[in-house]
Every structure is written in C-alpha cells, then in structure tokens.
Amino acid sequence: EIVLTQSPDFQSVTPKEKVTITCRASQSVGSNLHWYQQKPDQSPKLLIKYASQSFSGVPSRFSGSGSGTDFTLTINSLEPEDAATYYCHQSSSLPHIFGQGTRLEIK
Amino acid sequence: QVQLQESGPGLVKPLQTLSLTCTVSGGSITSGGYYWSWIRQHPGKGLEWIGNIHYTGSTYYNPSLKSRVSISVDSSKNQFSLNLNSVTAADTAVYYCARIVRDYGDNWGQGTLVTVSS
C-alpha cells in the first residue's frame, strides 16, 4: 500500500503570502496525484488533477507540480478564504490513499 | 450540475449494520466513465477510501474493510448504497459519497455523520 506524507501538517500564513505544500509518495505514482481543499464542515473539493491540471473553476492562484514521488501544491497570493485543510490523493494503485492533510491558518 | 446526497441513520448500535444511500441528481448514474464511491472521515482526522462501484455492478473495496463492506447500485432510483456490518465505535465518522471520474473525485456529497453507540 502506498503511503502519502504531506508537509507541513500545519502552517499559519498571512494574506498575499505564497504557500507551498508538499506530498511525498512511498513509491512512484506517476502523475496520478490529485489535490483537494476541505473547508471546515464542508466536503472536499477538487483543486488539481493529475499533478498539474487545474480543475474547472479553480482560481488561477492554485497550481500543482511534480511526478513520481514528489509533488507540490502552490498557492500564490493567499486569500483569506483559502483557510482550509489540503489533501493529496493517489490513484496509481489500489487502494486509493489520501495524505494526512495540511491545515492552513490565515493570520 | 450533478449533485450527490447521502441519507441514512445518524446513530447505529455496536455490532449492527451501518446502511447509507447516496442519491444522484442532475445526471444519470449509468453515465459511462464514472465510478461511484464511499469515503469516510473520522472526527478531526483524514480521509479514508471505502470502495467504488460502477453502474454495471463492478466493485472495489479497501482491503482494510473488505470483510465487512458491501456497495450496491440501484440504477432505477439513481442511487448507490453502502452497508458496513459489525460496526464498532471506530466506525464513527462522516461518510461521503462521491463521483469518480477515471481517478479523481469531482463531485462530493455534503457528508453525513454516523455515530456508533449503544
């Protein structure tokens, strides 16, 4: 079973800052890595599919990169509404696995 | 716009069966290319994939739950369902249904909290 490890677990940031969240897989997942945003008391929402493809309607400040075992979610010019927990998800092999999450707090 | 809505009891007794239904609206569950999934989130924790079903009935279950879980589809009602038997307090979680496009979940229900307690 593939393990996904996100870092950091928690980050407190100020608006307009640039944020980088990483996701490392225990073995190669190719580009089969997706990112979700979950706000408190809401269901997860897809941000990025296949490592770097933006999902429809997602603001352009969200971008993804990486392949194989190392991936990055970048949020440029953070907005207050970006306060949420972010999860990576691999679909390369079964079972599908999510990272443990990275919680972003906006100062 | 496809919408998913979970329904079912919010309280289940230990060792009983947890049963939830996901109703799909705004689109057909028999549309090709989609899988329909159940995912859960323990309180304050991360996400756990339970399993998938295709409208043809093909299923995949997470090995960690495989012995206790069953997912079925009712195309006539545009619904799919989750049964998890012999539940314990460790099964207390928010349960989400989601539409899977090839590999990723593009539409999720709002989630329903199920508490296992006597």
Image (cartoon, rainbow, N blue to C red):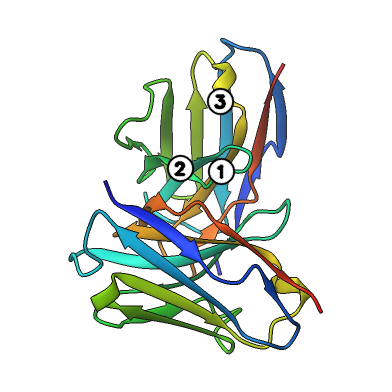
Mark 2 vs mark 1: same chain? yes
Kind of residue at disc 1: Gln
**Inter-mark Cα distance, 2 to 3:** 12 Å
**Inter-mark Cα distance, 1 to 3:** 13 Å
Q: Position of residue A98 (x, y in %)?
A: 55, 55
Q: Is residue A85 left or right of residue B31?
A: right
Give the residue furthest to the left. Answer: B32
Report crowding for label 1: few under 14, some 14 to 19, many 20 or more residues within 10 A (C-alpha).
few
Kind of residue at disc 2: Lys
Q: Is mark 2 on a helix, strand or loop?
A: strand
Kind of residue at disc 3: Asp
Q: Which residue position is annotated with label 2? A: A45
Q: Which residue position is annotated with label 1? A: A42
Task: Name the chain under label 3.
Answer: A
Q: Is mark 1 on a helix, strand or loop?
A: loop
Q: Which residue position is annotated with label 3? A: A82
Mark 1 and mark 3 in contact? Answer it, CB < 8 Å.
no
Report crowding for label 2: few under 14, some 14 to 19, many 20 or more residues within 10 A (C-alpha).
some
User: Which dot, 2 or 1, sits closer to the camera?
Assistant: 1
Q: Quadrant of residue A56?
A: top left
Looking at the rendering, in which quadrant would you find the C terminus of chain A? top right
Q: Return the disc, 1 or 3, that comes first in the chain's sequence.
A: 1
Residue beneath the point at 33% across and 61% down? B24
Mark 1 vs mark 3: same chain? yes
Residue beneath the point at 67% across and 63% down? B93
